[in-house]
Amino acid sequence: MSDVLKDLAAVIEQRRAEPQEGSYTCYLFEKGLDKILKKVAEECGETIIAAKNADKGEICYEVCDLIYHLLVMMNETGVPLDDVFAELAARSAKIGNLKQMKNTDRNT
């Protein structure tokens, strides 16, 4: 598997530790969590629209933006990428975890 996510997370960490003038990542850290969260929400919405438009190129572009902003958010909140990988690995080990639908008696 590619290490591109780990590499990107490392660049984000480096920008936080050693701010560089003109860096968009540094700008996000400077503005703080609220700005970062707004960007995550914005990119999520744009990803949804791209999917609705069924444009694979646009979907790929927006997913990359979303992943980048999620990595910035994770760094800002102290969540290491390895923790996310560990959680994904634990989830992938689950088999047959389909949630049971609740039966609701609508007559009562």
Image: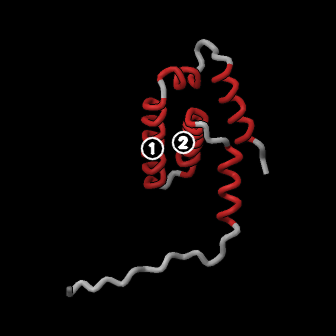
Please tell me whether mark 1 sits on a helix, a strand or a loop.
helix
Residue 21, how many percent across, how many down?
Answer: 60, 12
Q: Disc 1 or 2, which lies upstream in sequence?
A: 1
Pointer 1 with pointer 2, Cβ within 8 A: yes
Q: Gap between marks 1 and 2, in whole Å?
A: 9 Å
Quadrant of the rendering where the C terminus is positioned: bottom left
Along the line of sight, the residue nearer the viewer: 13 or 8:
13
Q: Residues within 10 Å of mark 1 (few under 14, many from 20)?
A: some
Q: How many marks?
A: 2
Which residue is pictured at 51% across the width and 51% down the height?
55
Horizontal placement of 34 versus 17: left or right?
Answer: left
Kindly state the secondary structure of the residue where label 2 is placed. Answer: helix
Q: Which residue is mark 1?
A: 46
> Label 1 sits on what residue type?
Glu
Furthest residue in direction left, as rendered: 108
- The percent coordinates of residue 94 (x first, y second) are 66, 71
In the figure, 96 relative to 46: above or below?
below
Which residue is pictured at 63% across the width and 16% down the height? 19
Residue at figure coordinates x 48%, y 54% from the top left: 51
- The image position of residue 77, as x and y in percent, is 56, 36
Disc sitting over residue 66 in the figure: 2
Q: Is residue 4 above or below residue 23?
A: below
Q: Dot 2, crowdedness within 10 Å: few (<14), some or many (≥20)?
A: many
Q: Nearer the viewer, mark 1 or mark 2?
A: 2
Type of amino acid at the residue the image marks with label 2: Leu
Q: Which mark is residue 59?
A: none
Residue 44, position as x, y percentages in the image = 47, 45
Quarter of the figure with residue 20: top right
Name the image quarter holding residue 18. top right
Above or below residue 15? Residue 10 is below
In the picture shown, does residue 91 fall above or below 66?
A: below
Going 58% across and 75% down the picture, which residue do you hit?
97
